[in-house]
Amino acid sequence: DGIMSTWPKVGKFDAGSVANTFNAEIRAVVDSLVASGRGAPTLVGFLANEDPAAEVYARMTKRACEKNGVAFELRRPSRLKLEDAVIEANKDPKVHGILTYYPVFGELNDAYLRDVVSFEKDVEGLNHRYRYALYHNIRTIEGDKKCCLPCTPLACIKVLEALGAYDQSKPVGKQLTGRTAVVYNRSEVVGRPLAAMLANDGAVVYSIDEHGMLLYKAGAVPGTIKVEETTVETSSVTREADIVVSGVPVKSFTIPAAGMKAGAIAINVSQHMNFGDGVEERCAFVPAVGRVTIAMLNRNLIRLHANFAVTPASAATSAQAHWQPSRSHCITAAASVAVAITAATLIALVRRR
Amino acid sequence: DGIMSTWPKVGKFDAGSVANTFNAEIRAVVDSLVASGRGAPTLVGFLANEDPAAEVYARMTKRACEKNGVAFELRRPSRLKLEDAVIEANKDPKVHGILTYYPVFGELNDAYLRDVVSFEKDVEGLNHRYRYALYHNIRTIEGDKKCCLPCTPLACIKVLEALGAYDQSKPVGKQLTGRTAVVYNRSEVVGRPLAAMLANDGAVVYSIDEHGMLLYKAGAVPGTIKVEETTVETSSVTREADIVVSGVPVKSFTIPAAGMKAGAIAINVSQHMNFGDGVEERCAFVPAVGRVTIAMLNRNLIRLHANFAVTPASAATSAQAHWQPSRSHCITAAASVAVAITAATLIALVRRR
């Protein structure tokens, strides 16, 4: 019925192999950075809550970084010292990436904290500047520096590509044309960026949250997206969707297997299982993307290191500069020096989305 | 029992007279701007929801602006056109202030929208840059330009000053020393900035939201604040507080009059009445601060106009500059010219907090 030969078969898929592919690429870049004398990038993780899930995520990050040759340092400030600790790391030229394990205070205060992280070190790609760029099809900042993309949505895209959901015979930006996706979650962290990215790639996307549904599509101008109101029913779009990604942070929320189209792709990005029993017998089912998310954090780290890492000569100047959020790019423009990157593999990695 | 003679008596207080005082000052500034040929500032309000409360608020804004000689234009884009409409207004040198009536999509997407508003036009004072400045005791941006403060918290401070809660015999920053305040709400829009401002003025502040309580105090270094964990009970701190401000957006939430200290000040900033019957017989009770909030919007507008309004000569350049959030200050620094302000009353108004 028109499903391409690359479309995945029904069954359960472990995203770990997708993560492994990216981690191997990242390892090669880090090795070349070390060989060239620039040194391995450093990622600092801040764990300031007592959430056991965050502990697990921090251990997973540590393991992936070790595998990739990236220096990872876990810091455990109290939540009330977290903001100052992030600001310190923003200013520290030896730190190339910053990651905070949320939730800390709650949604709105945490949203504030996300924007305290300098965009020069924001491996999560969740700074307002990066989200604004994504929603407005701005691909670079400060001239030709590639933007970071939000990690969990990017992980979903990479999993979909690896599963064969993208039609490689079509041009980039059209490889999901004809596909319908449903995304349960429209937060600024997961669902809204993901809807924008899927629409950018040609899909018709129904974006659902507790307030209702919106429709995301490719715009008339290539690279733009169009968002529309819609009155269709959740259950009917879910039943017809080729791709369903669910990130509802509620234990009792379930999309029953019978509510999915046979042969569709189902990706769970919630800490709870959002899909009902038997979904792997009806769909190509990915129960979690966490390891790919961490690979994307590492990938963003490499990009930020290439974009913003200061050479030893300019580090002293940069460290002394008075840091303020949203101003640091001005300071950097003045203080940093052009960085020569020779490793072809690095260039290839950072050039790709 | 140590209560100063300026402390208000028990009863119900209409904040309208406080608003009138500020509106008269603003009118004088606007008149002097018009007389000097610079023209009246323009405020654009965006109404993109179907909330009757927002309609009322928009009408109140219009009335206050007319009274103050400020040009007010209400625009009604669909919610899906709102972001583009705000970006247009950001770029338009004829617009000096932007105000959006929330909620539009929901808390997190609305938080994103707040940061799409250029800080050069953010009369609400809710841009990340202004909140960061407030929490870190940074009073100016781009050299000597005074920051805007969030309007509703600022309105509470002005109401407290007008009621006589501030001890004018003490130096600025100490005028609430010895006072205890409780703030129900720790959102980035109302409660957290208010807790910071009250602590800046010397009060011990218990800040409460659905996740728990935090304690805000003046720090050891003047102008800094200190935030601490606390295990005290909500009902006991409320019973002992000199000042209780409540902004809980839940209809069923009530602080009973008997739960307040006799002679305390009670200020309601929720759209629902958070205080129980009889509170005006036990406390100095302010049922709403909306008109003062609107006066503060106007006051911020005057400040932004003084800080950022372009002269006719530079307007053309500025309008053509490619606008991006968080970059506009760089562009402005290059494109705008120094603005000579002669009206003494304007200088006096913008110099004050």
Image (cartoon, coloured by chain):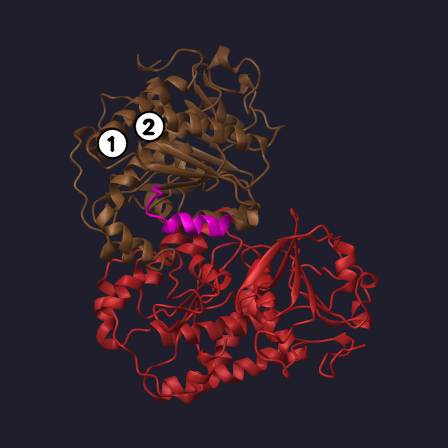
Chain colours: A red, B brown
Q: Is residue B90 magenta?
A: yes
> Is residue A256 in view?
yes
Provide residue A29's location: percent of width, then percent of height: 44, 84
- The image shows a total of numbered marks equal to 2
Q: Are marks 1 and 2 in contact (CB under 8 Å)?
A: yes
- Mark 1 residue crowding within 10 angstroms, few (<14) / some (14–19) / many (20+): some
* Location of mark 1 (residue): B34
Chain ID of residue with mark 1: B
Q: CA distance from mark 1 to mark 2?
A: 9 Å
Question: Is there one chain holding both mark 1 and mark 2?
Answer: yes
In magenta, the rendered stretch is B82-96
Q: In front: B269, or B314?
A: B314
Q: Which residue is drawn at the image coordinates 44% and 87% (left, top)? A: A345
Amino acid at dot 2: Gly
User: Can you say whether A339 is above or below B79 in the image?
Assistant: below
Chain ID of residue with mark 2: B
Q: Is residue B29 magenta?
A: no
- Horizontal placement of B258 versus A90: left or right? right
Q: Which residue is drawn at the image coordinates 45% and 66% (left, top)? A: A138
Residue A105 numbered tag? none
User: Can you say whether B84 is above or below A37 in the image?
Assistant: above
Residue B69 numbered tag? 2
- Horizontal placement of B158 versus B287: left or right? left
Q: In front: A275, or A80?
A: A275
Label 1 vs 2, first from the N-terminus: 1
Q: In front: B276, or A73?
A: B276
Provide residue B315's location: percent of width, then percent of height: 27, 50
